[in-house]
Amino acid sequence: MKSNEIFLALQEKLSELLKHAPLSDIKHTARAALQHQLTKLDLVTREEFDTQAQVLARTRERLELLERKVAALEAQQSLPKL
């Protein structure tokens, strides 16, 4: 389900609730419905995002180091033997 469809479905449900429920029930139900729809969007928290960005930065640094080591070893291999 696309996010636009999710929000349209949510809007439709909320409109129906407004017709039949008191205000406190509307708040509770709207919050629950919104939370349910947001979980379908597969979002991550800022903390999770920042953690993964740090892991990626460390991984890139390690990859660059390994690439330099491989290049140095390849350069040594290509030197004529005495």
Image (cartoon, rainbow, N blue to C red):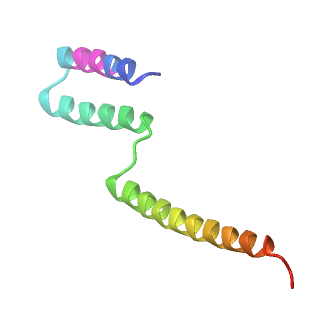
**Where is residue 16 shown, x and y percent of the image?**
25, 14
The quadrant holding residue 41 is top left
Q: Residue at x 14, y 26 (%)?
A: 22
**Where is residue 30 shown, x and y percent of the image?**
25, 30
Name above or below for residue 9 compared with residue 30: above
Q: Nearer the viewer, residue 16 or 79?
A: 79
**Where is residue 2 shown, x and y percent of the image?**
43, 22
Q: Is residue 15 left or right of residue 9?
A: left
Quarter of the rendering occupied by the C terminus: bottom right
Q: Nearer the viewer, residue 51 or 72?
A: 72
Q: Nearer the viewer, residue 18 or 77?
A: 77
Q: Is residue 68 left or right of residue 48?
A: right
The quadrant holding residue 73 is bottom right
Name above or below for residue 43 compared with residue 24: below
Residue occupying the far left of the picture:
23
The quadrant holding residue 11 is top left
**Where is residue 3 shown, x and y percent of the image?**
38, 25
The magenta stretch spans residue 46: no
Name above or below for residue 34 compared with residue 13: below
Q: Which residues are magenta?
A: 10-17
